Amino acid sequence: MPRPPEGRFLWTRRATSGLPRFLRPEGLCAGNSLPHRTTAGARVSLTDYIRKILTARVYDVAIESPLDPMPRMSARLGRPVLLKREDLQPVFSFKLRGAYNKMSGLSAEVLSRGVVCASAGNHAQGVALAAARLNVRAVIVMPRTTPAIKVDACRARGAEVILFGDAFDEALGHARELEAAQGLTFLHPFDDPDVIAGQGTIGMEILTQHSGPIEAIFVPIGGGGLAAGIATFVKYLRPETRVIGVEPDDAACMAAALAANERVILPTVGLFADGVAVRQAGAETFRLCREHLDGVITVDTDAMCAAVKDIFDDTRAISEPSGALALAGAKAYAAREGGGTGTLVAISSGANLNFDRLRHIAERAELGEQREVLLGVTIPERPGAYRAFIRTLGPRAITEFNYRYARGGDAQIFVGINLPGGAPEKRALIAELAAAGYRALDMSDNEMAKVHIRYMVGGRATGLADERLCRFQFPERPGALMKFLDGLGDGFDITLFHYRNHGADYGRVLAGIAVPPAERARFDAAIDALGYPCIDETDNPAYRMFLDDGTAATHA
């Protein structure tokens, strides 16, 4: 599925009479008898869901998290913004609500056999805490890409942790195998009515804590359990309040399902927001979101990084990327609506962040706020040209400058510039440069330029007419880079290679590979067999500007 622009409403409810049928005055009674079929085949009515949420046993382990004002963000958006602080839970995530609610309802005989779950980390911690409280054996299968902080937290609570696969879906399959082989009870992280009801208590708390009007509540979506629970409860009691899901633009499984009106499986998902890296929405969560969710917004990595910084600025708390997802969506919504004054609520869903990932987040946060611009600029290769260019920038602070001498009449520089005035100042700067005779290429939204090219400026090779430039992403763990190189094999010459550990849970490589026309089919087959996401960047203008000598052929 093509990646949508940041802040795009990828799916929006198309209401006929203004409200879904369940929520129209004439439909409330009838709606109570309309069933939802779960993955286990049980039938759960709307009224039953409300009852389940109201009576959920979450407060044996969970706190009623505060609904904190965000004064800085409110001032920036010109409207009240409130943050639901689920990052303050004992496991630093909302997930213990659903896990404990599910386990506390199981019989003693079932619990005696033990439980098993699959999780990217936060659901696992909820299960581990619940199992410790109930004195139950817990086997937890986690992807090998799970942040170490989450793995260690589960083991510290006595759970048996098994690392399996590179993504949630592989871990899920292995957990199901253990369920059958050992007679364990499987605890689904989102597609279960009791889990959904446990998460729905967050919606109940929000309406209790803020009795005034709420324009919209923003909820992060992975498999959809949190969004399904909150939307079901909120729309039942306050149908005028919008409930909007937020997903990363490279892991928008619920938006894709709602747009297609059926569950779909994404071919790949981005791993930056590991807490919501799910390829397919749940069956029951999809049904509930289709009935009650008002829309889905997608945001990119830079927007999430900027939201992590926003939360820190207002609360001095550090959110994980998926934990800041809802606030990123609220900001995109406010920019799209323009001039609104209604209260916005964002769920801060978790704070289980590896410390070394802060390096990447800090690097990208200013770009996410459009307070920094990255430019590729052509200047004359002559004495004094550098000073003349800097003089044109005026008093603006330079955040990065990369240059190397090049023979000929022109030089290419890669420059980062701080922009306190945001997008309007960026447009003004580019216009000023054009008026001064400089050719400037805005690379602020160019992923390859931000991750790789900025560290490689000045390196050119001649005579590489058959060079293909490819960008890869793969799970970051010992041996992953070697597996990548082994997968390429010895049949192709590597002409360029850039890899840098970004403090994330996935590695990124930029590779130039000599691929003669007669070998293109074999090369494409080798890349497909490798199984890593691959983006062909041969026609990327940043490559043409800084690395190519003009001999590389345009890739057809």
Image: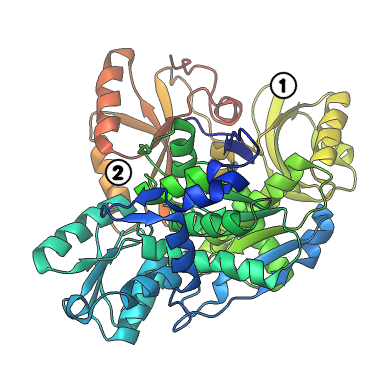
Answer few, some or many: residues within 10 Å of disc 1's Cα (few below 14, many 20 plus, some between 14 and 19): few
Residue lying at the far left of the rendered structure:
181
Callout 2 amino acid: Phe
Whether residue 248 is visible, yes or no, is no
Is residue 106 shown above or below 477? below
Instruction: Give the percent coordinates (x, y) of residue 418.
Output: 78, 49
**Residue drawn at x 46%, y 49% as measured from the top left:** 288
Residue at (33% x, 17% y) in the render: 516
Quadrant of the snapshot with the N terminus: top left
Which residue shows up at 54% across the image and 41% down it?
21
Circle nearer the N terminus (2, 1)? 1
Give the structural element (helix, strand or loop) at label 1: loop
Q: Quadrant of the C terminus?
A: top left
Please provide percent x and percent y for residue 514: 36, 25
Residue 530: name its quadrant: top left
Q: Are marks 2 and 1 in contact (CB under 8 Å)?
A: no
Residue placed at 37% from the left, 80% from the top?
Answer: 129
The image quarter in which residue 68 lies: bottom right
Q: Which residue is mark 1?
A: 409
The answer to whether residue 266 is left or right of residue 435 is left
Q: Amino acid at mark 1?
A: Gly
Q: Is residue 173 left or right of residue 383?
A: left
Say what secondary structure mark 2 lies in. Answer: helix
Q: Where does the image place residue 317, in percent across and percent down from the top left?
A: 63, 72
Q: CA distance from mark 2 to mark 1?
A: 40 Å
On the image, numbered disc 2 is attached to which residue?
A: 484
Nearer-the-camera pick, 556 or 393: 556
